[in-house]
Amino acid sequence: MARATKKDLSWFDINNYNFINGLTLSQFIKELEWRDFLYRNVDDDPSLFGREDAIKYERIFSGDPNLDVPNKEEKEIEEFIESAHAQGDSLRSIYGDLPKIASALGVSPITFTELSMYGYAAIDQGFFKRDEEYFYIKPESMLASVSGNLEKCFTNMVLVSIDLEDATDEEIIASMTKVLPLWRKQLELPEQAHVARKRIGLKTIKKLMANRVLPILDLLIWERRNGKEVSNPMIGALVFNDDPKDTQAIKETIKPFALEAMSEQYTRLLRLYMNKDGEINSSKMSELMSRFL
């Protein structure tokens, strides 16, 4: 593979990444997730990409790397799509919007689509019958849980009722802590090991910032997209021009860490850490870094 020259990388300016200091951890994670998507899909046929995705590459390679904030062209595309949905026969334009309460990773309110699938599965498997005048439910199933009894219907999920009126938040959280391992055992769904057991904390934030993960990832994305190697000395000169790094350290430690940091396993751990600490959630990256001074 041919090596990239300074002229090839004239689009790169480390000062374009000063915006990172003003990001919250949540916003920083979104920037990592964009890089993961672009890095994984860089070899796809460009004709198969939507214009919105192609713009992200163009933005990075023109010195505009704050990807989660839409630029002018992206805003125009969003406005066009919204207008088309409003004028066309979309579900939203036909039926309007019904309330959708919040969801999070692993916890989602049941939709009417899912509810109807549970109902059809229960009828199909003989738990109840209904016609215009008659409703019958199998007696032995009246107090049985839905989950664990229906075959081939969301078998990796638990249909749950959470009483928000009669139970306090603390009681609900304590109950979930108690029943989760029981559900996993009874349904034979052990906790997945694909989220690595790593210690995540303020030192992790410092490492992400000190190793300048986002600019390094942009150089690696350019490398894959253009088929030219961005050498370790070049990364050192461009990314760490004010804080020289040993090229061996870049090769063996800094680059591998950058690639790991944008992976789903790592960003999920960062989100878990963030969601457990309300202060971390709202603090800017520069504020978090100041704790080390």
Image: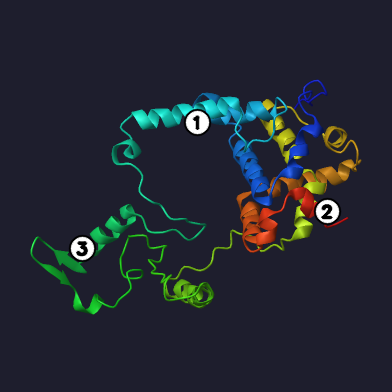
Q: Closer to the N terminus: mark 2 or mark 3? A: 3
From the viewer's side, name the closer residue of 235 and 34. Answer: 34
- Closer to us: 150 or 269: 269
Q: Earlier in the sequence, mark 1 or mark 3?
A: 1
Tell me, for residue 78, which label it has, or none.
1
Residue 231: name its quadrant: top right
Outermost residue on the front side: it is 165
Residue position marked by numbered label 3 in the rendering = 123
The location of residue 73, given as percent across then percent down, is 57, 25
The residue tagged with tag 3: helix, strand or loop?
A: helix
Q: Which label lies toward us, 2 or 3?
A: 2
| Type of amino acid under label 1 | Glu
Image disc number at residue 222: none
State which quarter of the image contains the C terminus: bottom right
**Front residue of 213 and 287:** 287
| Left or right of residue 143, residue 284 in this image | right
**Residue 206 appears in view:** no
How busy is the neighbourhood of tag 2: few (under 14 within 10 Å), some, or many (20 plus)?
A: few
